[in-house]
Amino acid sequence: MNGSRIAAIGHYQPARVLTNEDLAGLVDTSDEWIRSRVGIRTRHIAGPDEPVDELAAHAAAKALAAAGTAPGDIDLVLVATSTAINRSPNTAARVAARLGIPQPAAMDVNVVCAGFTHALATADHTVRAGAASRALVIGADKMSDVTDWSDRTTCVLVGDGAGAAVVEACPPGQEPGIGPVLWGSVPEMGRAVRIEGTPPRFAQEGQSVYRWATTQLPAVARSACERAGVAPEELAGVVLHQANLRIIEPLAEKLGAVNAVVARDVTESGNTSAASIPLAFSKLIEQGELRAGDPVLLFGFGGNLSYAGQVVRCP
C-alpha cells in the first residue's frame, strides 16, 4: 500500500463562448450585474451534438497523452457527473469505448460539484487496496442541458467542460501524491442545490449555500490540510469548486493559504460543477503557475450539500 499519485492532468472546453452581453439579450441582466454578484465574465457552452461523454473523452485523451499512458494501461475509469442524459451505458463506459480502453471497471460518481474530489479519493483508495493499478478520473458536466435559460438567477452561473487526471500507484519508497480525503455532507440541507424534475433543471437557494460555504467550510478545508500534514501557509495552490467568486475569495482567505495561488477560473468558465476543479487545476499547471511536486488543496463542495477535499502533489 504505497499510495497513489496524479501522473498527469488535462482539460477540455467547448469552442462556443457565451458572454455576459450575450446573456443580456436572453434575460433581464447586464455585464455589471453578473460581475458584481458572481464574478463571471464568460462561459463555454457545448452544442446539442456534444454529449457529456464526448467532453469527458476529450479531457481524458489529453491527460493520457500528457502522462504517456496508453488506453490499454487503464484498469479503472471513474467519471464524476450529474448531467448525463443517457443512464446506461453509464458515462464512464461510454468514455472507455471512445478511447478504446479494454475491460476497465467503469463507474459514474454523482456528487455534483464535489464529484471530482470524491472520485479522486475513490481512485486513490482503490489503488491503495490493490484493486486497480492505474485509473482515469474525470469530472465532466454539461450544465447547459439542465439550465432554465429564462431564469437569470441560474443561467448566468453555468458553463460546460471537463477535466481529467491519470492516477497511478506510487513507486516503492515514494511519498504518496494524494493525501487523505476529508469528506461528508449535510443531508438535511440537500435541497439547497438540486437538479430535478422532468426535464431536469438546476435550481439552488443561493443565500443558504453562500452562508454554509463561507462560514462552515473554512474549518473543513483546514482539517483536510491537517490530515495531509501540510499547513495552509505551505500550500502552493488552492483549487476550490469554482462556484462563485464571492464564495471562493472569502473561503480562501479564511483558510489562511497566504502563499498559495488561488484558482479563479470561474471568471472565464462559469460554474462547471464536477468539471470545475480539474479544469481550473489543469489550467494553473498549463500556465506555469504551479510546478511539479507543489502541494495543492483540491476542495469540492455544493450539491447534496456535500464536500470533499485532499492535498495533492502537482504532476
Image: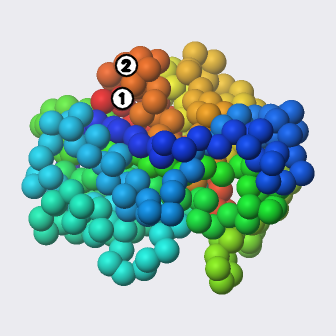
Residue 165: in sight, yes or no?
Answer: yes
Q: Residue at x 13, y 69 (%)?
A: 103
Relative horizontal placement of residue 47, taking residue 98 as reference (left or right): right
Residue 193: in sight, yes or no?
Answer: no
- Circle 1 sits on which residue? 314
Q: Residue at x 71, y 49 (%)?
A: 157
Vertical position of residue 66 compared to residue 234: above or below: below
Which numbered disc covers residue 173? none
> Element under label 1?
loop
**Residue type, label 2:** Arg
Give residue 308's position: percent from left, percent from top.
53, 52
- Circle 2 sits on which residue? 291
Q: CA distance from mark 1 to mark 2?
A: 6 Å
Q: Residue at x 79, y 54 (%)?
A: 26
Q: Quadrant of the C terminus?
A: top left
Q: How many marks?
A: 2
Q: Residue at x 75, y 39 (%)?
A: 20
Vertical position of residue 129 compared to residue 177: above or below: below
Relative horizontal placement of residue 165, taking residue 134 as reference (left or right): right
Relative horizontal placement of residue 31, taking residue 49 as reference (left or right): right
